[in-house]
Image: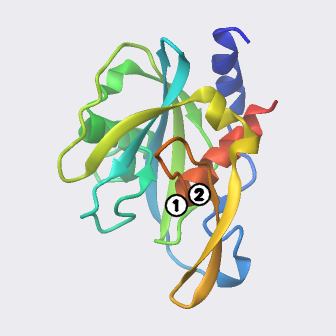
Amino acid sequence: MTIADPITRLRAAVGEGAPSSDFDLNPELRPAARQLRPAGVLVAFSETPNGWALHLTKRSSGLKHHPGQIAFPGGKVDPSDSNVIAAALREAEEEIALPRLAVDVLGTLTPHETVTGFRVTPVLGLVRQPFTPIPEAGEVDEAFTVPFEHIANRANYLVESRYFRGVQRRFQVVPYGPYYIWGATARMLYGLAERLGP
């Protein structure tokens, strides 16, 4: 596989696909119609000495939504944001000091509905200049990368379950080393892996 292959595959993955949600594996738990808040997350890949890699964060344990979980940089759309892409780029700059102008936005993927009531749009991008992630104190405990090959390989994705408030819930996971990537992040990554193809 050449260094250009991941870029070609990422470009081909852009666009609408099958909708996804935190309730995909638990359809019986889907709530009645509700108003979802728009959010954008940046699915950003950088070229490293070992190939292309995805930027992820470990969220602060003090956050209201998804504390301590592995996540993409991103968040809800603010009134100052022109769209979900602007929100994702702004949040990435705030959370890990990734300059907005350093990102070549390829496009968006199908939005994902979270159990916490957000309609999250993944924004796919390539980081076109070297940068050192600086976690924003209070929001991000750690910033790290995961190899493209790990994310693209659907064999790395598993379905696990646990009881939450007396109900068994199933969810996707894609562990990497010490990082337990699960829930909405893993589900959105699995959707990307499906679109990347073999």
Residue shown at 57%/48% (left/top)? 175
Furthest toward the right, the residue is: 198
Residue shown at 71%/83% (left/top)? 28
Report crowding for label 1: few under 14, some 14 to 19, many 20 or more residues within 10 A (C-alpha).
many
Residue 168 percent coordinates (x, y): 63, 82
Evaluate whether residue 32 shows in this view: no
Furthest toward the bottom, the residue is: 166
> For mark 1, what is the residue?
119
166 lies above or below 48: below
> For mark 2, what is the residue?
112
- Judged from the image, the secondary structure of the residue bearing numbered disc 2 is strand
108 lies above or below 67: above
Residue shown at 75%/53% (left/top)? 18
Side of 158 relative to 167 (left or right):
right
User: CB atoms at circles 1 and 2 under 8 Å apart?
Assistant: yes
Residue shown at 36%/19% (left/top)? 102
Q: Which mark is residue 26?
A: none
In the picture, the quarter occupied by the N terminus is: top right
